[in-house]
Image (spheres, grey):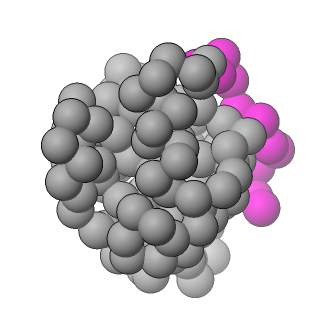
């Protein structure tokens, strides 16, 4: 399964970024092989508005089924929900550790956004 993880860097040992729409990178990780693709999110980092919606669209286009992040706003959550992408909020730490926790079944899916609108 492919999952998306917000990241401050370009590899699995990078710290997670708490911001979904404005994270510098989003890693699309295969949970079985740990192979990953790096999505450069720089266009959304400095966007005046719509960063979460655009990031959600990128994640959906790459075939991710789950997003692991710190904070996800209501508009981004709605786009992810419409694309049938489950969200795990309130995460921090290293990308690899978050993927491991997901693989071990230690994470719960969110039922809504965990932050209001613009960051």
Residue 64: x, y in percent? 28, 38
Q: Main secondary structure of the magenta part?
A: loop
71 within the magenta span: no
* Left or right: 11, with 100 as reference point: left
Q: Nearer the viewer, residue 112 or 33?
A: 33
Quarter-of-image position of residue 90: top right
Q: Residue at x 40, y 27 (%)?
A: 103
Report the residue at 46% width, 23% height from top: 104
Picture quarter with the N terminus: top left
Q: Position of residue 39 (x, y in %)?
A: 31, 68
In the image: residue 45, left or right of residue 56: right
Q: Is residue 118 magenta?
A: yes
Where does the magenta region start and end?
Answer: 109-119
Please state the horizontal and vertical placement of residue 71, each as a whole percent of the image: 70, 47
* 19 shown above or below 112: below
Residue 5, image x and y in percent?
46, 51
Q: Residue at x 28, y 68 (%)?
A: 38
- The reply to whether residue 80 is visible in this rendering is no
């Amino acid at each position: 399964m492919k999952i998306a993880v917000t990241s401050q860097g370009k590899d699995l040992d990078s710290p997670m970024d708490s911001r979904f729409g404005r994270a510098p990178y989003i890693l699309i990780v295969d949970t079985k092989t740990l192979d990953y693709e790096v999505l450069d999110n720089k266009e959304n980092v400095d966007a005046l508005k719509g960063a979460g919606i655009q990031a959600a669209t990128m994640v959906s286009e790459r075939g991710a089924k789950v997003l692991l992040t710190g904070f996800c706003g209501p508009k981004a959550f709605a786009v992810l929900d419409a694309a049938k992408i489950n969200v795990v909020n309130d995460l921090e730490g290293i990308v690899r550790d978050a993927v491991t926790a997901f693989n071990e079944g230690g994470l719960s899916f969110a039922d809504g956004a965990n932050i209001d609108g613009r960051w």
